[in-house]
Image: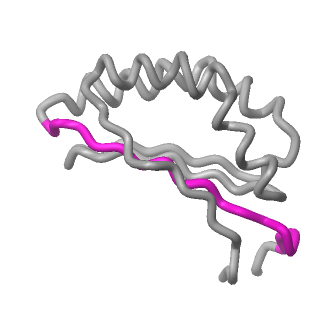
Amino acid sequence: MTESLPATAYFRVSRATFDPSRFEEVDAMNTRTSEYLIPAVKRLPGLIHFYAGVSPEGSAVHVSVWDSVEHAAQLDTLKEMAVDARAEAEAAGVTFTPIVNYPVNWTI
């Protein structure tokens, strides 16, 4: 069954890289920051889904689905994300690529 999303839905992709030798440190940081990121993100209007993953190959990703681009953009200024978690990630050697918001064109 295909999930029905609003016609205005967007997904937000935040990608990062790190030295694979630091995987355990980055993975632990990702788990630790989730303790304050989850409640903060859940409070934001428009959230449909949020996924986070860290690969032992040296990359990490956060993908979230929102009901509008305006709601997706809330993460850009959410203190817990833009300041706190970012600082912890950078301290663990994580380098971010520019964040992109994409309109949802189709789903399966």
Part of the protein shown in magenta: 4-20
Q: Where residue 42 sits in the image (x, y, percent)?
A: 78, 33
In the displayed structure, 70 sits above or below 44; it is below
Q: Where residue 8 sits in the image (x, y, percent)?
A: 84, 68
For the N terminus, give its image quadrant.
Answer: bottom right
Question: What's the residue at 87%, 69% (across, down)?
Answer: 6
In the displayed structure, 92 sits above or below 27; it is above
Q: Where residue 62 sits in the image (x, y, percent)?
A: 51, 46
Q: Is residue 90 magenta?
A: no
In the picture, measured across the screen, residue 65 lies left or right of residue 30, that is right
In the picture, measured across the screen, residue 88 lies left or right of residue 82, that is left
For the C terminus, give its image quadrant.
Answer: bottom right
Question: What's the residue at 63%, 25% (across, down)?
Answer: 37
Give the image's coloring scheme: one colour
Question: What's the residue at 31%, 17% (across, down)?
Answer: 91
Question: What's the residue at 83%, 58% (across, down)?
Answer: 67
Q: Is residue 16 magenta?
A: yes
Q: Where residue 11 sits in the image (x, y, percent)?
A: 65, 60
